[in-house]
Structures are given as structure tokens and as C-alpha cells.
Image: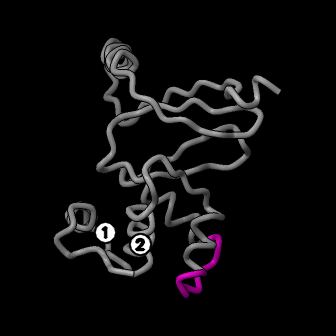
Amino acid sequence: MQHLSSYDPIIENLRKRGHRITAQRETILQIFKEEPHGNHLSVEELHSKLLEKGYRVSLATTYRTLKLLSVLGLLRELDFAEGHKHYELKQDTLPHQHIICTSCNMTLEFEDHFLETIGQEIASKHHFQVIDAQFKIFALCPRCKDK
């Protein structure tokens, strides 16, 4: 696996904020960069990928690293009401929302600028600054609806 370049904006973002660039953090960010668009990883899925690549890291350490990268704004933490969180790379992605099938958990990403605009307006009205806005629709996908 190629490591992120020292000039990678994600790595530079971490350095500018005074955070160490550990091999583990770099590897986790690289795994997210290699994921197909729209793929969201759980802690367990990421941990399995780390083990496959030969990294001996505990599940607890993987969880703490994902939390840190989320707090730093590099990953987006998502809750699809499955009892665990999913994560995606926040940079290099357009703002988007999710439709989640309540039967099979299929997740579809969609863009809707109206939702972004209304979220900004509501936050501004109450003197808040938006860091992230997540809008989720829970529904039945066409396949499950027809069963």
C-alpha cells in the first residue's frame, strides 16, 4: 500500500493542528481514500482491513483513532440506526445525505442543496456555526418494498 504523501492536504491539516502523524493514522486515512465512493466503514470493518494489511492494532485503539479523526473533521461519523457508527472520509466529498433501507440497510447517497441551505439558515438564526449537517431518510428500498 502506498502511504500518503507528506504533501497530502489531509496530512498537512493534521500537522498544522499540532497532531502527530502516526503510521496508524496515516494507514487509516489511506484505507478511507482507497474505498469506493459511497462506501462507509464501521469500526469492525476498518479493524479487519488493518489486520489484513498486517497491522496488529486493537479494536479499542481503532475506535479511539476513528473518534479522533472525526473530532478533527477528517472523517464524518454516521449513525444509520444499526447500533454502531459508520465513517467516511470528509474531505474530497461533496456535501451529501443518506437514504437508508430499514430492511436490508442498503444506503443511498444523495445531494440536496435545499437541505444544506435550510440547515445553515436555522443555525445562523440561533447564532450557531455549522460544522456538519446530516439528514437521513429511513425507508424501504425498491427491492424490499416489493417483497
Side of 73 relative to 68 (left or right): left
| Mark 1 or mark 2, whichever is nearer to me | 2
Q: Tag 1, which secondary structure?
A: loop
Real-space Cα separation, disc 1 to disc 2, in angstroms: 10 Å
Side of 101 relative to 13 (left or right): right
Side of 25 relative to 45 (left or right): left
Marks 1,2: beta carbons within 8 A: yes
The residue under the point 77% across, 34% down is 103
Residue 80 is inside the magenta segment: no
Return the residue nearer the eye: 142 or 42.
Answer: 142
Return the residue nearer the eye: 29 or 111.
Answer: 111
User: What colour scheme governs how the chains and residues are painted in the rendered image of this protein?
Assistant: one colour
Q: What amino acid is at disc 2?
A: Arg
Q: What amino acid is at disc 1?
A: His
Q: Where does residue 41 sit, x and y in percent of width and height?
A: 56, 56
Residue matched to label 2: 25
Magenta span: 52-60
Q: Where does residue 4 sit, x and y in percent of width and height?
A: 29, 74
Residue matched to label 1: 19
